[in-house]
Amino acid sequence: METLSNWKNVTLGSLSSMGKNIGAALPKIVGAIAILILGWLIIKIVLFILGKILKLAKMDALSERINEMDLLGNGKFNIDIVKITLGFVKWLLLLVFFIVAADILDWGIISTEIGNLLRYLPRLFTALVLFTIGLYLGSIVKNAIKSLFESFEFGGGKIISGLMFYVIVIFMSITALNQAGVDTTIITNNITLIMGSFLLAFALGLGLGSREIVADLLRSFYTRKNYAVGDKVVIGEDSGVIEAIENNSLTLVTKKGKFVIPIKDVVSQKVEIKS
């Protein structure tokens, strides 16, 4: 009987202690849940207002302009500035209310770790902004170089513009990683070595391969200086009127038809101008 009485006392003591602990923790649990519910409502309101503000600021139009630039060379990758901003603000506010709830429950470790993550988020967001700016600048430079080569009727514009695009994106990506707190020393050293070797080889190849292009430009300058569109000329055995003078060719209209003569052949032959 004495043993049963002891068991009874131990059981009642355990249940009583458990009840006291639950009673002490229950207000904290209710308070944490109330904070999370209140936070959820506040987040909904803030996101609704912020979404309206972003639409009034025409961020959708900016997203469309960026996507039209086709930054990554395909139409599968779309940037939605509104969604990105709203998502960032949503998780930022969620973490704030999680910290408050953890503090109410006396979960110090969880509160501290979430606080560390919260302090890191602005750095991560800045890194994403830098990466996006790198894509944007790279696309602008790529289109500018491509248009420049096309205006001069040079070949290789697509390759060179693509190369410059990836160079800018790589360096901006490294900058973004540094901003995010990632050690990029090894990456930077390897990329510097690779890019240095590649650019040296490219410069040598361009210098050796562009001699004829430079020569054509000089010949074109000489031809434009001495002849004009509409002049009646005799070039070799062909007699006609100059219709156009391009960077590397001259178009001559004769009785037999229209001929496109390379600039180097025009300069190397005797040209007679008829009055």
Image (spheres, grey):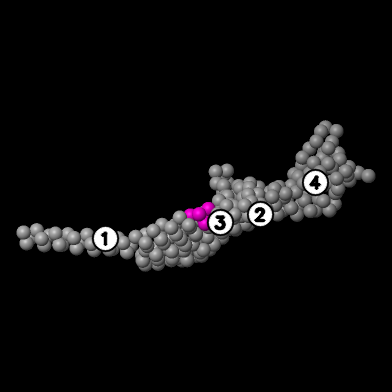
Label whose residue precedes the other's in the sequence (3 or 4): 3
Q: Distance between the residues labelled 2 and 4?
A: 49 Å
Labelled pair 2, 1 in contact (Cβ < 8 Å): no
Residue type, mark 4 in image = Ile
Q: In this figure, which residue is indicated by the disc labeled 4?
A: 245
Residue type, mark 1 in image = Gly
Q: In this figure, which residue is indicated by the disc labeled 1?
A: 19
Labelled pair 2, 4 in contact (Cβ < 8 Å): no
Label whose residue precedes the other's in the sequence (1 or 3): 1
Question: Which residue occupies the extreme left position in the image?
Answer: 1
Labelled pair 1, 4 in contact (Cβ < 8 Å): no
What is the x, y in percent for residue 199? 56, 59
Q: Can residue 147 be seen at all in this image of the molecule?
A: yes
Labelled pair 1, 3 in contact (Cβ < 8 Å): no
Locate residue 122 relative to residue 215 in the image: left or right: left
Q: In this figure, which residue is indicated by the disc labeled 3?
A: 46
Q: In this figure, which residue is indicated by the disc labeled 2?
A: 57
Q: Residue 235 versus residue 173: which sits nearer the camera?
A: 173
What is the x, y in percent for residue 100? 43, 64
Label whose residue precedes the other's in the sequence (1 or 4): 1
Residue type, mark 3 in image = Val
